[in-house]
Amino acid sequence: MQMIQALIATPSVSSVNPRWDLGNRELVELLAGWLEPLGFAVSILPVCGRDDKFNLVANRGSGPEGLVLSGHTDTVPYDERRWQHDPFRASEENDRVYGLGSADMKSFFAFILAALQELPLERLRRPLTIVATADEESSMCGARSLQQSGLHLGRHAVIGEPTGLRPVRLHKGIAMESIRLTGRAGHSSDPSLGANALEGMYHAMGAILDWRRELQAAHRNPLFKVAVPTMNLGHIHGGDNPNRICGECELQIDLRPLPGMQIDELRESLRERLGETLNDSGLGWELSPLFPGIDAMETPAQAAIVQAAETLTGHPAEAVAFATEGPFFNAMGMETVILGPGHIDQAHQPDEYIPMEHFQPTLALLRSLIQKFCF
């Protein structure tokens, strides 16, 4: 509990809004201070082009294969007025521990440290690596930086996101795109005086929805609760007054592809559809990503880490809709499973908590994974 308390008490919010965004240096140094006395060689690596954002990579042991235990150090922003507990204090109540990051996912680091303290680390036969990343909740720049670094971290990876201690080997990707149309404003009494960007967006939306129907007809994976790729038309704004022809309009969409669907290819297909609809409309148009996007993840069912996680938890590996850093780890040559204490429905919520009934099973799971892959 003392380590959970210390982690929760150390603010490390990441946000696309600069007003909320904080660094994670203090939290990374806290982890380093716990890992170094256990014989880990610790590297603190700057990321994101910032002097206050860092990844931590801690390694003990050498050789091929090896196990990677990973988590992100940041939390989402919070609205203290909606919390009944102090977000920065690990509060025990009703067999739960409340606090910002308790489930998503600072507690996982405390469980790793507690498990390590009970193991004869001097007998490691294969490497054990602990990874703590920056900015998973906003830009994913920590995981992107790791991928770009060319580091070899290990063969088998567990990312301790809150999954209710059920292994996850597949998840959807996510892309968020902006479509901007530029027309010509004019007096609404004479349509010939302008070019209406809002009317153009109506036609663009029709093309987008037709494309969505085609994608959902062509791609289906019954392992997911929502078995098809989804696309949400989430935000639109344009024009400024009813009696003016709309000169500018923007639509923002969210796309969740299935494994096997590549975000870059989807963007190009969307660009082609928009071009077919808008190129002769007299409107200017632009398609741009709101962030680089995260590919879907699929780790093979026969992967050793998946089979070990299924055996140790007693649950078959699942598919989920939320995105993680898993695709970046798989792209680095690892086989990754998402598996951790707490529940995803607690993530990003006021009065976030982790159930205390997960404490001992998590410790036992981590000890077993380390023994299997490193001893």
Image: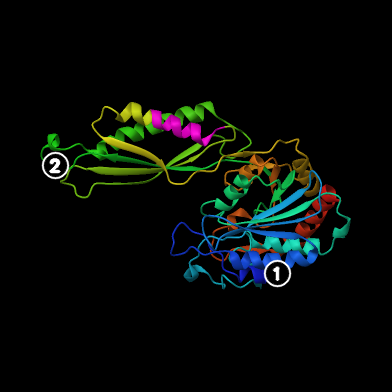
Q: Position of residue 115 (x, y in %)?
A: 79, 61
- Residue 188 shows which numbered tag? 2
**Mark in front: 2 vs 1:** 1
Q: How many dots with numbers?
A: 2
Q: Which residue is drawn at 56% across and 73% down?
A: 86
Q: Helix or strand or loop: what does disc 1 sit on?
A: helix
Residues at marks 2 and 1, CA–CA distance in whole angstroms: 64 Å
**Residue at the (86%, 50%) spot, across then down:** 125
Q: In this view, does 360 lie above or below 373?
A: below
Q: Mark 1 points at which residue?
A: 3
x and y percent of residue 191 in the render? 14, 36
Neighbourhood count class around disc 2 (C-alpha, 10 Å): few under 14, some 14–19, many 20 upward? some
The one of 12 and 358 positioned closer to us in this rendering: 12
Where residue 201 appears, as percent x and y from the top left, is 30, 37
The one nearer the camera, 274 or 311, is: 274
- Work out whether 375 lies above or below 83: above
Left or right: 231 as drawn, with respect to 5: left
Query: Is disc 2 placed on a helix, strand or loop?
Result: loop
Whether residue 71 appears in magenta in the rendering, the answer is no
Q: What residue type is labelled 1?
A: Met
Highlighted magenta segment, given as a residue range:
261-272
For badge 2, the amino acid type reads Ser
